[in-house]
Each structure stands twice: as C-alpha cells, then as structure tokens.
Image (cartoon, grey):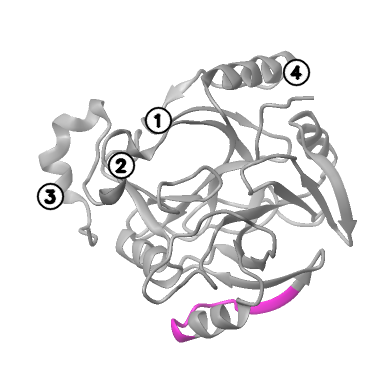
Amino acid sequence: MLTQIKGLHHMTSLAADARENNAFFTEVLGLRRVKKTVNFDAPDVYHLYYGDEVGTPGSVMTYFPFPNMMRGRHGAGEIGETVFSVPAGSLDFWADRLQHYNVHGLEKEDVFGEKRLRFQNPDGEGFALAEISDDPRAQWTTDAIGTDHAIRGFHSAGMRLQDTGAMSELLGFMGYQHVDTKDNVARFAVEDGTGANTIDLHSVPGASMAQQGAGSVHHIAFSVEDRAAQLDVRKALLDTGYAVTPVIDRDYFWAIYFRTPGGVLFEIATNEPGFNRDEDTAHLGQALKLPKQHEHLRQSLEARLQPIPA
C-alpha cells in the first residue's frame, strides 16, 4: 500500500465560456483566481485555476474553457460530483446566495451524516457544499462571503462507475481506507491528507458511459509532497501494471497520468513548486502567464483569448 498520496491536489474540468466560468467561481462562489495561463496542448485555450489565497493543494479547481464547446453527457466512468467544505451552519446562506444568482440544481440532502447543498455550474457540472465542523483550513474571503461561510477547499469527489470493485482495489493500493457504505455509495478516505481526503464511489451498473464535453471533469489529481514521492508512486503503479505517463512539468507542479478501471483519468501532482513561482502572492492570477514554449505566441494569444477581468 502506498503512503505518499495525501488526498486531492486539484480537479480539472471543461467549460464553454471563459468569462462565464471566471465569474461563477470568483464572484458567485468567492474563490480566488490564482493563475491565468493556457492549455499546454492547445495554447489558444485558457487554463484557469481557482482556489484559496495561494492555491493550496486540496483547494484548486481548474478549467479548460473551450469556446462554444458542446455539453458533455453525464453517466458512468466520470467524476459526477465535486464537494467543497464550508463551515457548519452556512448552508442557508449559500442556498439564498445561489438562488439569487439563479444557480440550477439546488437541493439539500444528508450524505453520511453531512448536511449538503447540491448545485450545478453554468455548464451543468455537479457540485455540492458540505458542512464540516472540524476543518481547520484557511479560507479566501470576499466582501460578500466572510469566514462564517467561505469555502475552505475540497471535501471530496464522487465517482460514478458501472462496477466499483477494481476502483476500490486501486484506492486501497493508493492508501485509502474503506470507511462506510450507504445504499449504492462506498466511502474511502486517506489519513493525514490535504483536508480533501475523501472519495465516494457511486455504483451505477445500468448507466451508459459518460461522454466528455462542457460540464465534464477531465481528470482528478491526487497530491504528493515532492518529486521523489511522485517517482515512488509512479514505479509502484508501473509495477502493478498501470500505463503511467512520464513525469510532465506543468510549471506549478509536476504531473503523471494514468487511466483507471472504469475510465476515470487520474493524475498524481506534486505540491511543489506552487503558484507563486512566477508572480507574487498579492497578484496571483492577474497577468497572463505562458509556458515558456508558448511565450513567442504572446501577442497573438492576447489578441485571440477572450478578455476576462484581471
């Protein structure tokens, strides 16, 4: 069993409009945009990062907003819901706020004893806010969203799978322990993680396979402390039979990727070097930062990318 994985690092999804995506996460949810850069493989598409003040692992939601992208089709083989941690007693505030902004899919529920508020982003992607009383993580606050209500980071992610058996074995190998099962949902958690320590596996044996598009999670990333830990994880996965990519420099972390049973794409990302490697903390996410291989395209990219607020 691996011991290097410390919960979630980030989640990366697809969207259809950069300005709408930016407004939803910074204005409606009150997260901080910690990086404005571009897709390494498609530099005419933004890569936007939202999180806490410094983009702490376990708090960062990232997006590839492909202009006018068709919506995805939800189903099996995907991350069906991303859950944020909020303070106990804050759901009424959030229900009123999200209703004010005409957010769709609002529904209160109780999951494993946690009070939750489900909702969808503008592309139909599934989210929830969970009241967690013992989460000590620092919050990014705004004039409208104070410490009594502000998001602390991720709580969990829910995967929808036709068969959860192989994924359960993989999570166990990655250091996750099975902690509970209710109806068709099995909960797994890792100790001493980033705070985003929980994965829920939803068994949906009759569901058709998901098709990616706007509103789909592209991949889920797990946190390791550094490159040495990442190399240990990579070797262990290769030895187990997984096809794992070489280590890829993503400027703000190093990454490896592999496809899991049931179709979900996993990434293992380092906590180093962080989002302040190329801009100071006070100005994170304001300037357009380009990977060095795309810097020569700056003038054309700045002319073509949809303007979004600084």
Q: For the point 22% across and 45% down, which residue is it? A: 288
Name the residue type under label 4.
Answer: Thr
* Residue that label 3 marks: 303
Query: What is the three-letter code of the residue carrying label 1?
Result: Arg
Answer left or right for 302 relative to 12. Answer: left
The answer to whether residue 78 is left or right of residue 141 is: right
Tell me if label 3 and label 4 are in contact, CB under 8 Å. Answer: no
Task: Specify the segment rendered in magenta.
Answer: 100-109
Position of residue 142 relative to residue 178, above or below, is below
- Tell me where residue 109 appears, x and y as whole percent: 74, 75
The disc at residue 240 is 4
308 and 264: which one is in front?
308
Measured as percent of width and height from the top left, residue 145 is found at 45, 73
Q: Are marks 1 and 4 in contact (CB under 8 Å)?
A: no
| In the depicted structure, whether residue 162 falls above or below residue 100 | above
Label 3 neighbour load within 10 Å: few <14, some 14-19, many 20+: few
Q: Which residue is mark 1?
A: 250
Residue placed at 83% from the left, 34% from the top?
Answer: 169
Front label number (3 vs 1): 1
Judging by the rendered image, the residue that carries numbered circle 2 is 38
Q: What amino acid is labelled 2 in the image?
A: Val
Task: Give the mark toward the camera: 1 or 4.
Answer: 1
Which of the two discs, 3 and 1, labels the residue nearer the N terminus?
A: 1
Spatial separation of the CA atoms under disc 2 and disc 1: 11 Å
- Mark found first going from the N terminus, 1 or 4: 4
Q: Secondary structure at mark 2?
A: strand
